[in-house]
Amino acid sequence: MPFRGERLRAMRILKGFRRQTELAAALSTPKESVTQQMISKYETGKGPPSVDMLIRIIELLDCSADYLLGRSDHTEPLTEDESRWLESHRSGDDSALESKLREAARNKGRPTQKKQ
């Protein structure tokens, strides 16, 4: 999947980083300096970030890697429950998801109650 630079730009602006230099400064660490040129390269599609940089970007911008890779149109990362169900499914254990689906079917048409 190719990295979608235009989505990075949109998320950068949405999260309040008006300039590429602001995002670069926020992503920089004592061990690795991130430059405006690097952010520009990612946003213009001239080169994708490394896996480590992608992880830092999604953590900082609180968005999903799937969104930045064009695999999903959902910007938000998975919830803890969604991550747990996905991991269970990948390991071949769908019992938690099946249980949740049965519960949803039983409650169909009833108002949902929010946990406090």
Image (tube, rainbow, N blue to C red):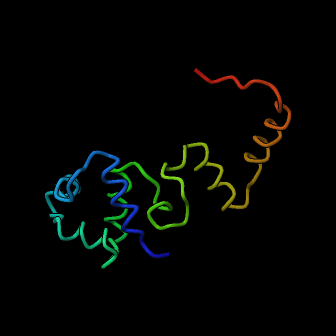
The one nearer the camera, 14 or 47, is 14
Residue 4 occupies quadrant: bottom left
State the count of labels.
0
Q: Is residue 65 left or right of residue 105?
A: left
Q: Is residue 47 left or right of residue 99?
A: left
Residue 40, position as x, y percentages in the image = 24, 69
Residue 78 visible somewhere in the drawing: yes
Residue found 62% across the figure and 56% down from its top = 87
Residue 42, position as x, y percentages in the image = 30, 70
100 vs 38: above or below: above
Residue found 45% across the figure and 76% down from its top = 2
Residue found 49% across the figure and 50% down from its top = 77
Q: Locate the C terminus and report the quarter of the image it occupies.
A: top right
Residue found 48% across the figure and 52% down from its top = 75
The one nearer the camera, 91 or 52, is 52
42 vs 28: above or below: below
Q: Is residue 88 left or right of residue 1?
A: right
The one nearer the camera, 68 or 29, is 68
User: Residue extending furthest right?
Assistant: 106
Q: Is residue 21 left or right of residue 5?
A: left
Residue 31 occupies quadrant: bottom left
5 vs 18: above or below: below
